[in-house]
Amino acid sequence: MKRLLTLSSLLCFSAGLVADELTQTAQMLDLTRHPIGYMALFLFFLAYALAMIEEITALRKSKPMVLAASLIWVLIAAQYVSEHRAELSEQAFRSSLLGFAELFLFLTVSMTYLNAMEDRGIFDNLKIWLLRKRMSYRQIFWLTGALSFVLSSVLNNLTTSLLMGSVIMAVGRDNRRFIRLACINVVVATNAGGSFSPFGDITTLLVWQKGVVPFAAFYSLLLPSIINFAVPALIMYFFIPRGKPAATADQMALKRGGVAVIILFILTIITAILFENLLSLPPAGGMLMGLTYLKFLSFYLQKTGGDTALETSEGEARLLAEPAEKSPSFDVFKQVSALEWDTMLFFYGVMVSVGGLSFIGYLTLASGFLYTDLDPTIANVLVGIISAFIDNGTIMYAVLTMNPAISQGQWLLVTLTAGVGGSLLAIGSAAGVGLLGQAKGIYTFGSHLKWMPVIALGYAASIATHFLINSRWFT
């Protein structure tokens, strides 16, 4: 709670800062060839390398990233203080904090709702429902892929992939070929599904909050995203084994308030959209308003007794009431405390570090190479390929910080490529990394790599589709 209050205060304070941008740029120091600049680059890439091998070292990725961000700004501030220009570095640092604060507040509410859905048994119900349908392996391949595509447009890709991964592991059991191909399909579908929705992925969320692409324009990427998912899925389909998995005897149980949480989450998303489109206010403000919806539901559930579960057994539904508990049955602040704080702090480290590298001058150099020396289309395709190696949120934030003078069609292109480019490698997205751990020894980096040419075909087809149907955005 204290963290939320602190960041909210920071937003208000930072919003009141006014500076002459041209004067500030003239007074900035070019540290790109200074020892401080080289040290900042070294710290950033060292921290990122440690974050990438988190599974090997067991060192949480946020630790090296936050330390690197802090040290980078210590070096910058020390140099500016020595030059009697401390106010410039101070304002630049506050600007980086402001960018993170809006993202932090948006993700806090979104992830709190996801935790609430998990607490109410919504995801478990979906998994059991799928297992009870007695579908063939090929039908489940398409269904888990399609659901991943749809769900990732409103849920984060890690949650979506792990949910579908649990279904795949339960269905496949000893059918390793089905598990491998279904996991690859889920990774591609999840990344594609998050690429056309303003709140589906960290890349689209950053672009939306920056204001370079209007809300409605994102949905022009729907068909390219479908093509990105469908092309490799169609090819892999013919390699899926025939037959049906064994049935499950698990029971379905949905805790009281589960449906209400889903409805309130939808209302929260609508509120965020209205804040941005009608009121020209940050979407994070609408999300925080939506958090109060969940808090009122929590209050109602606490005051009206214990949990009540709706169970379905052999086609019959019955209401099971448990005695009221003395302790609260559903507390929204428990859902907040269960957030992925390591991921949140990792994003802090990345955004503040990139802000520091930009202030030093490196992103100006990178922007000049990518968007001046190269054609913007080639640059944006390369950004997508790079996102297979580096977190797509990091890449997109770097591009937004560069702020190249490109058309809206090119902004949509880089949003698409940065979102779906992570599917090229298993480690290119949170969805892939999550499934590597969940299906350990079956779905591997090598098994994904063998299908990279097929995934790359979908990547190229989605780009071609974007140019074909969205040509009006390039003028």
Image: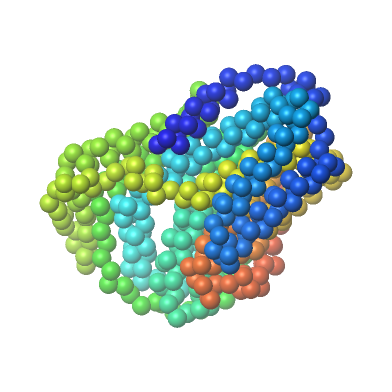
| Relative vertical location of residue 169 with respect to residue 198 in this rendering, above or below | below
The residue furthest left is: 323
In terms of image quadrants, where is residue 305? top left
Which color mode does the image show?
A: rainbow
Residue 447, how many percent across, how many down?
61, 74
Query: Which is more toward the observer, 310 or 288?
Result: 288
Numbered circles on residues, count? 0
- Residue at left offset 25%, top offset 65%: 251
Q: Is residue 421 visible?
A: no
Looking at the rendered image, the quarter that the C terminus falls into is: top right
Q: x and y percent of residue 255 in the render? A: 25, 52
Write the residue at 66% across / 27% down.
Answer: 91
> With respect to residue 181, does 277 lie above or below?
above
- Extreme-front residue of the structure: 82
Residue in the picture at 34% in, 35% down: 293
Question: In terms of image quadrants, where is residue 280?
Answer: top right
**Residue found at x 40% / y 31%:** 289
Please state if 360 lies on the left or on the right of 95 as rendered: right
Examine the rendered structure and indicate whether residue 322 appears above or below residue 27: below
